[in-house]
Amino acid sequence: MGFYDLLESSDGLIGHGTGLVNVNVFRPFKGEVILGKITSGTEQGIKIGLEFFNDILIPPSLLLDGAKFDYTDQVWVWDNGEGATFYFDIGETVRFRVEAEEWHDQIPNAPDMPDGSSAVERKPPYSIIGSMQIAGLGLVAWWS
């Protein structure tokens, strides 16, 4: 759960019925189609962000057939098989389908090592695996 905004503040005394909270609950169902923006692309896949949630990954195996990572431009490219090339540019709006969700238990941080490195790579407590394998998914601009 994350804190989104503080609506009102007072002297710190909370009386009965005076608390005010804004809670955003987000848990999409498998198969749901969502719009998001590309935040980054690496050889591990495309990261998608929403206005309030950023732990969405589209792995290479769940991209459109013919998609490959361009190491020169550090961007994913889709060749549709008819000679046209389409780019998954950062900041573009995409449509993706939810395929799975991952939950990771959060353990307390271990002390840092003497060389300054961290003992364990932290994973987000909740993340989504999405796909863009069918027509209509991918950049919204391609299909409009």
Image (cartoon, rainbow, N blue to C red):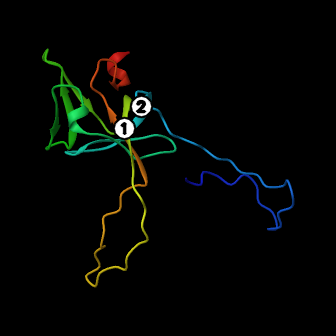
- Residue 11 position within the rendered picture, expressed as x and y whole percent measured from the top left: 82, 67
Q: Is residue 116 depicted above or below 45 in this figure?
A: below
Where is residue 57? Give x, y as percent: 33, 42
Which residue is found at the position 33% from the left and 23% from the top?
A: 137
* Residue receiving disc 2: 30
Q: Dot 2: few (<14), some (14–19), or many (≥20) neighbours within 10 Å?
A: some
**Residues at marks 1 and 2 touching, judged by CB atoms closer than 8 Å:** yes
Residue located 50% across and 41% down the image = 51
Specify the quadrant of the image occupied by residue 105: bottom left
Residue type, numbered disc 1: Ala
The image quadrant that residue 80 belongs to is top left
Q: Amino acid at mark 2?
A: Lys
Task: Kindly identify which residue carries mark 1.
Answer: 100
| Real-space CA distance between mark 1 and mark 2, rounded to the nearest whole angstrom | 6 Å
Name the disc covering residue 139, or none: none
Q: Quadrant of residue 12?
A: bottom right
